[in-house]
Amino acid sequence: MTERQAPPLRLAGLHLLVLWSFAVAQPLLDLLGRNGEFFAARGSTRWDAVVFALVLVFVPPALLLGIEWLAGPVRWAVHALFVAGLVALFVLQAIRGAGGPGTLLLFGAAIAGLVGAWLYLRWRGARLVLTVLAPAPLLFLALFLFNSDVSRLSVASDAHAAAERPRAPVVLIAFDELPLNSLLDARGKIDAKRFPHFSQLASESRWFSRATTVAEGTTHAVPAILTGRLPRTGEFPTYADHRQNLFTLLGGATTLHVDDDETHLCPPALCPGLEGSLGNRAGTLAEDTGVVYLHQLLPDDLNGWIPSIANGWDNFLHDASAHHDPGRIDPGFLASLRPQERPSLWYLHLMLPHSPWRYLPSGARYNVPSAPAWGPDEVWNSNQAAVDQSWQRHLLQLGYADRVLGRLLARLQATGLYDRALVIVTADHGVSFRAGEKRRPLSPANLEDIAYVPLFVKLPGRKRGSEVQTLARTIDIVPTIAEAVGVPVPWRVDGRSLLATRPAGGDVILSKDRGRRFTIPAAALEARREAALRRQLQLFGSDQPLSTLFAVGPDRGRLGQSFDERRGVKSANWSRGPGPILQVSGRASHARSVAVVADDRIVAVAPVAQGRFWVLAPRKVFRQAPRVYAIGG
């Protein structure tokens, strides 16, 4: 075959199919097949996954072949261009981890693609190799459909609901990624200055101050809340894997109001429309797959513009949109929060204060680049100053979560539902901020940060609060609801009612997503939590307004003071884009902290580690470029 000839159309299509499968389809099928939560989190069934795989493998090569057919006399050139592009994609994924500038890797992959196309056109052996590899796409499909997490997705989801009539309405609110320590002051109580609405709830309910989750992540922690059972290996956050849950317990005699985009335990028969249409699921699946592939393809220094995939399992483009507000509650759900003739259950899963952290306590969004955060396996950067800024942003966003809770409580009180209902507020799991350690996956170094979560139980007709210091677990919520509203649980649960007398002591059991469990004596874990709280207080203080969170570290007490030192920091940069927050970053050797100054007063403070610093400051105080000075050293 000469350079200006292409193989017969049928053979060309086969070669495109093979190249596409190796360059795009197989990497995606392999990655997503090992992470079935990608499908389960959006409510996809096994048939959704089958259609996805068939479309991914066969449709794009067919479209390329159609374009080639339309090219007519220059079909050989179009075919060569497609071959070069697919070879380049394959090579780029192979070399992306080799190190070096991303642009250089892109250039190398492009050269490899051109060489591959030249060999394809000039050397019969290259075309023969692709022909011999023709069965590979079918093999990739078979492995995905029959030997991966996808094989465990359910096809059917018929609901079987109990018909016991509860004697009181139930409101269950679950926050996401909220460690208990983040809410506490120096006395170990809810910080009323920073989080007044959580404090109000604690004063009017039973606050279980030793409550723990049982799992490291949403996909197992939320089902544990809704079933009363410890996680089991291989389960997805779907009704098919958790048919005995709070919704089927109360759904037969109760009106369900459910707002949760992350898990799918309420069956469609009881919660119609919650999972969205097939077209909507397919659309978000295609969008998110494209984002995942770009992360799989591009070198790390070239993927900063791609939406993060580290903050959940779906809706990556939606979550990155400036219009997406995790504190926004569906108006219909909010309007339904009122006494009703029929018993009702309201369940709300709020993605607050979960990362990405980009909201101020007021609800205003800011868009400044974050300090270097976590890398593979969610391991934090080794620079504690960088990690501390993420911790600071988490606490600021927790202020927004408190504001949203205040709106919910105000609505409940205004309609009279607050007094009549059983109201439970909790969180699925915590998060850790330790340089060089894991952010959220459980490890021996972060158990105390992940384990403890807030848990408030306000009984119907009661508004006098108390602190309960005996061990409690999120798997106790379903048994507690059942006892409070007089509906027996017809399945075996691992939790026990929080309204019953509870023994002191015991062990805390925490499960990793892939099955390993940590078991640690509650007293030992509590001592570690108290030490972690002291560390947090040294950085951020307590019993002060949230505005003081712009001062972090040993010199935070200097916030608002006049500044009379003159050791300036030469290497400093600041974000110049719009928004309520400005970030200053740079280098400051031999300094303990840096202070950002406006009008001769300190408006922000941050620690220095390894000669680097990152400071958040309110933009409104600056009339000119910020001045940065070193403190201590």
Image (cartoon, helix red, strand yellow):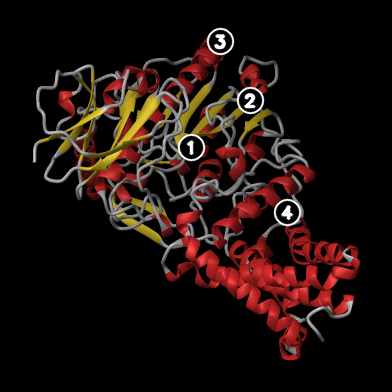
Q: Which three-letter amino acid code belongs to the residue tagged 1?
A: Ile
Please tell me whether mark 3 sits on a helix, a strand or a loop: loop
Please tell me whether mark 4 sits on a helix, a strand or a loop: loop
Residue 287 % position (x, y): 67, 48
Would residue 339 be found to the left or right of residue 453 on screen? right
Report which residue position mark 3 lands on.
416
Q: CA distance from mark 4 to mark 1?
A: 28 Å
Residue at 33% over, 30% down:
183
Q: Are marks 1 and 3 in contact (CB under 8 Å)?
A: no
Residue nearer the viewer, 298 or 295:
298
* Quadrant position of the C terminus in the picture: top left
Relative to 78, say whether 594 is above or below: above
Would residue 461 be found to the left or right of residue 161 on screen? left
Residue nearer the viewer, 74 or 33:
74
Q: CA distance from mark 2 to mark 3?
A: 20 Å
Please tell me whether mark 1 sits on a helix, a strand or a loop: helix
From the viewer's perspective, is the residue at label 2 or at label 3 nearer? Answer: 2
Residue nearer the viewer, 357 or 188:
357
From the viewer's perspective, is the residue at label 4 or at label 1 nearer? Answer: 4
Q: CA distance from mark 2 to mark 1?
A: 24 Å
Residue 397 % position (x, y): 41, 30
Q: CA distance from mark 4 to mark 2?
A: 25 Å
Q: Are marks 2 and 1 in contact (CB under 8 Å)?
A: no
Report which residue position mark 1 lands on.
477
